Structure formats: structure tokens, C-alpha cells
Amino acid sequence: MTPPRTGDLGPLQDGSRAVIIGGGPGGAAAAIALINEAAALGRQIEVVIVEGKQFGDDLHHNQCAGVLSPPIVELLEDQLKLPFPYHLQRSLISGYTLHANGSTIQLDGGTDTSIALRRVQFDAFMLASASQRGARVVPARVTGLEMHADSIVIYTENAPLKADVVVGAFGMDEGTAAFFTELTRYKPPPALSSIVTKYHPGENAMQKFGGRIHAFLPKDARVEFGAITPKGNHLTINIAGIGVTSPLMDNFLHSTDVQTALTGFENAGRYDPLDLRYFKGRFPRGLARHYTGDRYIMVGDAAGLVRAFKGKGINSAIQTGVRAARVIMRDGISASAFGQYHTANRDITGDLPYGQAMRLLTISAARINLMRAVLKAANHDERLRRALYDAVSAHRAYNQVVMDILSPGSVKALIRAFLSYFSFDHD
Ligand SMILES: Cc1cc2nc3c(=O)[nH]c(=O)nc-3n(C[C@H](O)[C@H](O)[C@H](O)COP(=O)(O)OP(=O)(O)OC[C@H]3O[C@@H](n4cnc5c(N)ncnc54)[C@H](O)[C@@H]3O)c2cc1C
């Protein structure tokens, strides 16, 4: 049942209440931005975050690899007025090593370093910051919704809440998405599964591994990509694909490419008995449908507002949280006011077709062994190497990556590599 429209769907005014479902980066950013916007406009509003997990004390695990990429510092400091939590940093990511079809290439981006940290600690920091700025945090799960012409009722494991507007920041939680699909035309984004594990190879092996993320494009059609990320005293290892399973992770861990990247692998479990337990997570791989409507707006993963192929989901969640808050405070909370949100997110949505094309091309090339030739070409062409770096690191938009790949120099280098590949010169 779609709620009936009312006339009073303008920007939030004194005494209004916004309830945010989910206190991950998208929800916490939306809360802080709502509070900042309200203060700038001289309005008194109430912001409530309902979050079911406890991020402190290791009670809940987060599958995320916790790599924060540029411009994360500017996002926090300029857009949220929040000092970046450098004290949480575990490793600095200096570059990437891409493995595909038995070949390897080093990809470096100069000063574009990323920061690896423990995701639960980052979430705890963001939620505490929202609370310090005046958001009320309700430690409970949302268990149901009612949509009315003049309000939304949010049922929780704690007391129920009534809101003028709801921000859906519940990530890929299928149960919460179902509350919206029952009441609105919202359809959650299509998903990619991921299996994640940790491995403590010991201090010396960690030093030897260094500050590079190793990214893998396996030949197995069921695995779209894999990655090994250094996180201070351990490595986070993950694979992703539409239906990845634990046997596929076993195969990945024992593949030659991974064994080559992992020195001292035989020591697994010696430094931490909980090593190599598998966790499962999900990424969006496309946009959600109807992720805005009268009195509700989704941000981050719940909206599928992320890059098509490779990551930066935390940045997108924060960015879209800030944009949702601006529209709520300046334009209104109706389906038509949220048109401004769709306009503001065109940098993400406009780049999706390019990302999806790159995703298909890369996966297909890896499956038919062509990535070997692509890496060979990139070794001889700076622009192609830069394009691969940008695609793997997610530092630039995919349309720019595609332009670099289609530049005359890169096309020439690719043709040369393909010709030598097909004449069986596979060096
Ligand atoms: C394996 C893996 C690795 C990743 N690595 C990276 C990376 O290195 N860098 C990066 O930028 N991104 C990474 N991502 C993506 C990133 O995790 C997400 O894009 C990001 O967390 C999205 O933020 P969000 O706020 O939209 O949702 P989430 O972070 O998922 O937050 C949603 C919150 O809502 C809460 N919630 C859900 N339902 C309810 C309910 N009913 N009641 C109360 N609370 C509820 C949840 O408990 C959760 O805390 C990774 C993802 C996966 C799966």
C-alpha cells in the first residue's frame, strides 16, 4: 500500500523528527549532516538513529575490508566537519598488485594512499560522533513500519517511534528491505556475495607482505574477484561473486596466484587460533528501484548507490547520507522533492553503465585468459597502467578509466599484446 500524499511534505521545520534505520557510515553521516544543516538554518529538529548492532567490544563482526580511499578525509572533514580518526589507522595502502591469468602487474598511484582500519571501530567512531552532535541512538532493531499520510511509525525492539521522514540506511539487510517492499514500490539492489576471512601470518611475514593490496581476477567463472588486504597485524582475504561458497574460498586460498602472494601461509592458526574462519557478506551490484518516495529516502548500499565494479562503498554511503540530509532540510520530504537527491547522485548513477561495461569486459577477459595480454600491454603503456590502477583502486570514475583505455596509445599497446598473444608468444 503506497501512503496517500499530503500537502505537508516540505523541508523539516522546528519540532520535526527524522528517524534513520541503521547506524553504519551512511546512517551516521546522514544524522550528522541533518544536525549540521538544521543548525545552519536555525531550526530545531530531532534526529534518531536505530541501530541493531553493538560496534564496540567485538560483539559483532563486519565483513568489510575497511579500506578507506580518497577523498574520505575531505568527506569527513569538509562535508561533516568531523576530524578524520587517524588513530584508528592499521595500515597505509601504498599500491596494488593485480594478478590475472598467471601474470602480475604493480599498480601505483603516487600520493593517492588509502587507509586500512577495523571497520567496527570506524562504525563505532561515526556513531559516537553522531551521538555527540545530538543524535539519539536507539540500540535496537527495527521490527516493522507503518506509513501514514502525516507520519511514519517505526516499530523497534525498544519503544516505537513516530517520524516525519525515515532515512533507510540499513545496508543489504534483506529483512529490513522487506518492510519497505511491502509498503512501497522499493526493490532492493541486486547483490554479489562475498566470503571473507582473516589470517595472521606473524610479524615478519606481515612486514614482507608490505602495504599493497593484492587483487585477483580468477579464471573460475564463479569468482568475480578476490583481494588480500594488509591490516596491521593480519591480512583480510575476500572473494566475491554472485554465488560464492566456502569451497570456492578453499580453492582460491590454494590457487597458485594466492600462494605466491602469501608467504608463510603454512603458519595459519599458529598466531591466532581463530584464523581462516569464513564470514559471508553482500555487495550491491546495481541500483535499487524506487529508493525514494513520500517520507522515505534510502542511502548507501540500501539504495545500491555504489560503484558498479569495485568498492568505495563507505565513501558512497557517507556522500549519499550527506546529500539526503541536504535535500530533507532544503527541498522537502516528498517523492518529488527527492528528485533533487537523484540529480545530486548523477555522478554515481551516470557512471554505472561504464562500470558495468568494465565489469563484464574484465570478467570475460579473465575467463578466456586475455587478461595476461592486457597486463602485458599495460606494462608498456603508462596510460593503460593508470587506467588499471584507477579501476582497481576505485580512485577515478569509470568513464575516465574507459577514456584512458580508448586512448590511441593504449589501444595500440593492447592490439600489439593481443597479436603477440594470439601468435602464441605468451611471455
Ligand atoms: C566483503 C566486503 C568488503 C568490503 N570492503 C570495503 C572496503 O574495503 N572499503 C569500502 O569502502 N567498502 C567496502 N565494502 C562495502 C561497504 O561495507 C558498504 O558499501 C558500506 O558499509 C555501506 O554502508 P551503509 O551505511 O550503506 O550500510 P552498512 O554499513 O551495511 O550499515 C547498515 C547498518 O544498518 C543496520 N541495520 C540493518 N537493518 C536494521 C534494522 N532493522 N534495525 C536496526 N539496524 C539495522 C546494520 O546493523 C548496519 O549497521 C565491503 C563490503 C563487503 C561485503
Image (cartoon, rainbow, N blue to C red):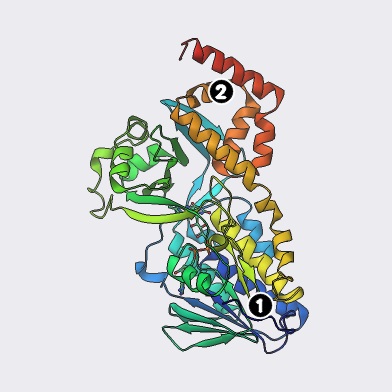
Pointer 1 residue: 35
The residue carrying mark 2 has its beta carbon less than 8 Å from ligand 1: no
Does label 2 or label 1 sit earlier along the sequence?
1
Q: In which quarter of the image is the N terminus?
A: bottom right
Disc 1 packing (10 Å; few <14; some 14–19; many ≥20): many
Q: In the image shown, does 107 or 255 lie closer to the viewer?
A: 255
The extreme front residue here reads 1
Identify the residue at horizontal 52%, vertical 34% (top origin): 362
**Label 1 residue SS:** helix
**Label 2 residue SS:** helix
Identify the residue at horizontal 41%, vertical 73% (top origin): 54
Q: In this view, does 386 lie above or below 80?
A: above
Where residue 161 appears, as percent x and y from the top left, is 53, 87
Inspect the image, locate mark 1, and give the three-letter code of the amino acid beneath it. Answer: Ile
Inspect the image, locate mark 2, and give the three-letter code of the amino acid beneath it. Answer: Asn
Where residue 377 appears, as percent x and y from the top left, is 57, 21
Pointer 2 residue: 379
Q: Mark 2 and mark 1: span between their CA atoms?
A: 49 Å
Does 62 sit left or right of 34 as displayed? Answer: left
Q: In this view, does 187 lie above or below 5?
A: above
Where residue 394 appears, as percent x and y from the top left, is 58, 44
Q: Quadrant of residue 404?
A: top right
